[in-house]
Amino acid sequence: ATKFIYVTRHPIANIYGTDKFVRDSMGGNIDFEILLKNYIALHKYMKMDEQVLESPVMWVHLEDFTSYPNKVLGQVFQFLQVSADEAVVQQVLDNMPDISASPNAKYFKIWCEEGIAKNGHLMQKYAEELNALDLGYNLDIC
């Protein structure tokens, strides 16, 4: 049977990470508000899909995976009904590039030092929609 795994990330880190990717790979940038609206729209679609899919869905926070890779990967393997044996999980992790335990730290630093002054009003404008997604992220990170 088909199973879906949705991986999500804190919206501020996601926006800054997407912006960095666009700048580095395409030489351009995308307005913060457009990236924020995109984040909300994509997550709304995933939440709607989750309600109508006839297949199991698992949500994974990137932050949980990077903080507890063995635990989260084991949970993913259990969800997929493949071997979640600790040795198998460790072997997979040993063959991956290094996992940063705090991939959002640099983006949160940028947000707190300059981003909140430029775009804090947008986070307030969309706070209700972000909170309605019920992803469990704290938007007050500074």
Image (cartoon, helix red, strand yellow):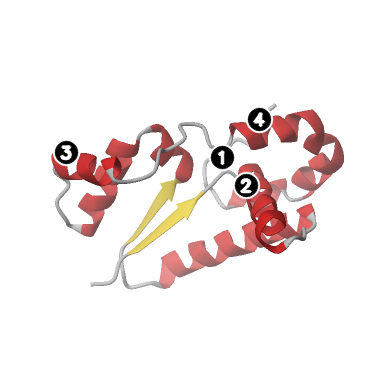
Q: Residue at x 43, y 66 (%)?
A: 51
Instruction: State how far apart marks 4 and 1 are (Cα).
Output: 10 Å
Q: Secondary structure at mark 3?
A: helix
Labels 2 & 4 near each other (Cβ < 8 A): no
10 Å neighbourhood of mark 3: few (<14), some, or many (≥20)?
A: few
The amino acid beneath tag 3 is: Glu
Q: If the image is split into quadrants, where does the N terminus sit? A: bottom left
In the rendered image, the vertical position of residue 53 relative to residue 112, given as above or below: below
Q: Secondary structure at mark 1?
A: loop
Q: Which residue is mark 2?
A: 11
Q: Secondary structure at mark 4?
A: loop
The amino acid beneath tag 1 is: Tyr
The amino acid beneath tag 2 is: Pro
Q: Secondary structure at mark 2?
A: helix
Labels 3 & 2 near each other (Cβ < 8 A): no
Q: Which residue is mark 4?
A: 141
Q: Which residue is mark 3?
A: 86
Labels 1 & 3 near each other (Cβ < 8 A): no
In the rendered image, the vertical position of residue 51 relative to residue 135, given as above or below: below
10 Å neighbourhood of mark 4: few (<14), some, or many (≥20)?
A: few
Q: Which residue is mark 1?
A: 137
Labels 2 & 1 near each other (Cβ < 8 A): yes
